[in-house]
Image (cartoon, helix red, strand yellow):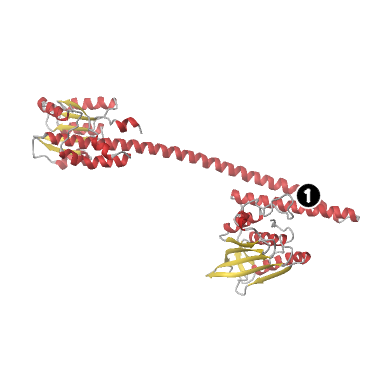
Amino acid sequence: MDDRIDKTPESVRVLFADDEPAILEAYRGTLASPTNARTRSDALDQISAAVLCREAALLNRDSAALRDTPLEFEVTCCTQGDEALAAARTAAAENRPFAVAFIDMHMPPGPDGLWTAQQLRALYPDLNLVMVSGSAEIDLSAIGRQVPPPDKLIYLQKPCHCDEIRQLAAACGVRWRTERQLRSTLAQLETLVERRTEDLRKALKAAQAADEVKRQFLAIMNHELRTPMNGIIGTTQLLMTTQLNEEQRTYIDSTYRCSLSLLALLDDILDYVKINTGTLDLNCTNFDLGGLCQALERVFKRRCNKKGLSWKLTIGPDVPATVKGDLLRLRQVLMNLISNALKFTERGGIEVTVELKKHSGRRTMLQFAVADTGIGIPPEKHTAIFEPFMLVDASTTRGHGGSGLGLAFSKSVVERMGGRIEMESRPAKGSTFRVLLPLAQAAETAQEAPEAPGEKSGATATG
C-alpha cells in the first residue's frame, strides 16, 4: 500500500445539494478547516473513535495517530439534483469520488432528492447518503427500499445543528475511507493469491512433466540395462555347460557371480527410483506366511552353514497361516534384512522370529525380527543408516559390499504398506531389526506355498 496515503490521508469529498444558497454556505462553513480542523466536538470524537480504531486494526496502523489526524473535507455545493449528478459524474471521471452526499428531499423546480439519491447510488454504490428534509412525515422504509442499501442511508431533519453535520460527515467519511482502503488491500491480496496460485500451477505442471520424464527414463533404463545383463548372464550359463578346464571354469564362475551382483545392484537402483517417483505399485494377494518363511530358511540356512553361523527361525503359535499383502515386497524386505545380518556377522548366528503383536477383526499386526551377533552399528549412525547410500563403513578399504540402498528401500516400502522399521544395535554386540507390518487375515485357511526365492528371484538383497 502507498506510504503517502498512510501518512497523508486523502481529503474526504462531500457533496451538498440544496435549493437554498444560504443553507449551502452554512454547510460549507461548517466543514471549513481554517485551523486544519484541530478542534472537533466531543460528540464527533465519541461516534468516530470506534470507527477509527477499526480502521487502524484493518490497515495495521496506529489508532492513536489516526485519532490525532484531522479529517480534511473538500466540499462541493449544488442547488439542483441534476447539477449534483453532473458534479458526481465529473468526479467519477477524474477518479476523485465523493464519500458522502447531503441531499435535500425537495429542490424545486428540478428533480427531487429521491431521484437524485437514486442516480447517485447507481453511479456510486458505496456512497453514503444523508437525506435532509424539513418534514417529519418521511417514510424511511420506503426510501430505503428505493435507495438501497439501508446501512448507507441516513435521515436528517431540518433545522440541522453544526455538530450534526460535522459528525455525520466525519463518521461517514472515515467509514468510506476505511472501506476504500480495505477494498484496495483485498484487491492486492487477491492479486497476490492469483499470482501465487499461478506460480504453484506452473510449478505443479513442471513437476508433473519432470515425473513423466522420470517414468519414461526409468522404463528405458530398465530395458536398456537389463537386456545386456541378461545376455551376459545367459551366455555365461551356456559357457558353464561346455567343456572347460579348471582355470577357465574359475574365470566363468567369477564372471557369473559378478554379473548377478551387478544385476542385483541395478535392481536396487531401479527400485529406489520407483519409490522416489511414486511408480512403485503394491500388489496385495493372499499368501502362505509359513511358506514364505520356510522358503527364506532354505536359502539362508545353507548360506549360514557355509559361513559357520547358526540359524534359527521361530514362528509364533498364534501367527495366522494365511495373510493378505504384497508377498514380493515383504520377501524383498526380509531378504534385505537377513542378507545384511549375514554379511556383517562373522561369529555367532542369525535368528528370525515372527510374532503376532495385535489382532483386531481380520486385521493383524505382525512383527518380523532379524537379530544377528555381528559388528553392530555405532549409536551416531542409528538414524542415518536408513538414508540412501549410507554405509556403516564408507571407506575404500571396507570389507563388505553393498550399495547402501537396501535399508532405505526397505524402510520406504514398509512405510508404503502402513508399517514401520525399528532397530536396536550395539557395536561388537550385534543388531536387531524389527518390521511391524499390518496385514489382513485371508479368508482362506491355506494357500499354496510361494516359490522359493533363489539368490535372485525377483527380489534384491543388498546392504
Image x and y of residue 187, in percent: 36, 36
Label 1 is placed on what type of residue? Answer: Gly
Image x and y of residue 210, in percent: 58, 42
Q: Is residue 6 left or right of residue 80?
A: right
Image x and y of residue 172, in percent: 21, 36
Residue nearer the viewer, 307 or 190: 307
Image x and y of residue 269, in percent: 67, 50
Name the quadrant of the N terminus.
top left
Q: In which quarter of the image is residue 371?
A: bottom right
Which residue is at a point 76% across and 49% down the rendered structure image?
229
Residue that badge 1 annotates:
231
- Total marks shown come to 1
Q: Does 395 appear above or below 114?
A: below
Residue nearer the viewer, 174 or 82: 174
Q: In this view, does 408 lie to the left or right of 455?
A: left
Q: In which quarter of the image is residue 249?
A: bottom right
Q: Does 226 appear above or below 450?
A: above
Q: Quadrant of residue 179?
A: top left
Helix, strand or loop status at disc 1: helix
Q: In this view, does 378 lie to the left or right of 94?
A: right
Residue 83 visible in the displayed image: yes
Which residue is at a point 62% across and 46% down the rendered structure image?
215
Name the quadrant of the C terminus.
bottom right
Q: Does 191 appear above or below 294?
A: above
Residue 448 visible in the displayed image: no
Residue nearer the viewer, 161 or 426: 426
Residue nearer the viewer, 394 or 367: 394
